[in-house]
Amino acid sequence: MIERYKSGIVALVGKPNVGKSSLINHIIGEKIAIVSDKPQTTRNRIGGIHTTQSGQIVFYDTPGIHKPLHKLGQYILRVATSSLAGTDLLLVMVDPTDGLRESDNLVAKHVNGSNVPVFLVVNKIDSYTDIRRLEEFMESASRLFKNIRRRFFISAKTGTGVDKLLEAILDSLPEGNMLYPEEYITDRSSRFMASEVVREKILEFTQQEVPHSVGVVIQEFSEENDLLKIRADIVVERNSQKPIILGKGGSMIKKIGTAARKDLEYIFDQKVFLDLFVKVREKWRERDSLIQEFTNLKDELL
């Protein structure tokens, strides 16, 4: 019997910081989604494309489902919940190290209303040696969600259980042709990747409210004599935040730029000249036009 080619769309959903971006990066084998220990790192729906001889899976890394605190948060929640529609499967991720919280109930509300088949995935099992505790957590999480077809224990950090999960996903998808050329690993542009890498370094090196108040806009992305020139504006909400991004004598923005440039040179496999500027746009997270300009959300919410 000849096996038919499989293809489909799988959305990763869950509360913030549950490990969705780490899992998709592990599966693709490249860094296509930024990662930090701060909630709501992911603002956009990012496609990671996993292609094999037997099938193609388009994974969508989605923002963590949460209660929005400002207009930007409302946009992010719309991106997360709209990603549930039109998918073949939902990977609902839960975190035993954090336990089940009200945010998991909010995720369940949206997932259960979608009527899409669910694979329940318990992540971060590398933090546990007692399998009974994990099994008890799995049973508690299972009571929150409808349409669960299968359940899995994994570690996105170490890769434990991921191959078994991938095999089950492929088995569950419908027959179909490739949705993207086989050499593609993401549906996102190079400009988008550049802006996200810069934002990741800001998340890594700054604290408190500053990282969440930041937007990044790529103003120039051009190649000249094998050198990739990128000029970006880092946008903050208040005048008091600008010197934090700049640092004493420009030390912080130099640190951000150096770390971002190293990642970008790895991603694009060429020398990069990165020029960063800091600008203030008061309360931009509450203004529709500025939210769309500074977060790459415009095309997703048309």
Image (cartoon, rainbow, N blue to C red):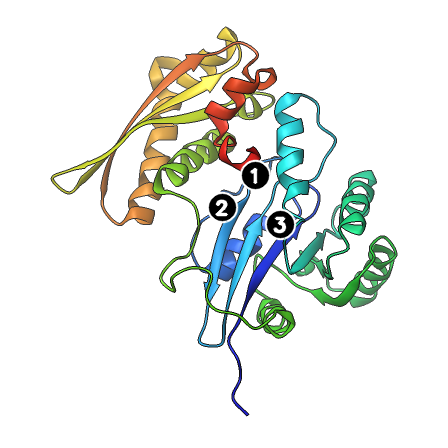
- Give the structural element (helix, strand or loop) at label 1: loop
Residue tagged by mark 1? Answer: 42
Query: Residue 164: image x %, image y %?
Result: 62, 73
Marked residue nearer the N-terminal end (1 or 2): 2
Circle nearer the viewer, 3 or 1: 1
Amino acid under label 1?
A: Thr
Residue tagged by mark 2? Answer: 33
Query: Along the horizontal axis of the image, is 191 left or right of 270?
Result: right
Which residue occupies the extreme left position in the image? 225
Query: Residue 167: image x %, image y %?
Result: 59, 74
Q: In the depicted view, which residue is nearer to us: 124 or 120?
A: 120
Compared to residue 263, the image places residue 288 above or below, namely: above
Rendered residue at 36%/21% (across/down): 251
Residue tagged by mark 3? Answer: 19
Amino acid under label 3?
A: Gly
Amino acid under label 2?
A: Ala
Q: In the depicted view, which residue is nearer to us: 133 or 84?
A: 84
Q: Distance between the residues labelled 3 and 2?
A: 11 Å
Query: Along the horizontal axis of the image, is 143 left or right of 194?
Result: right
Marked residue nearer the N-terminal end (3 or 1): 3
Query: Along the horizontal axis of the image, is 15 left or right of 201?
Result: right
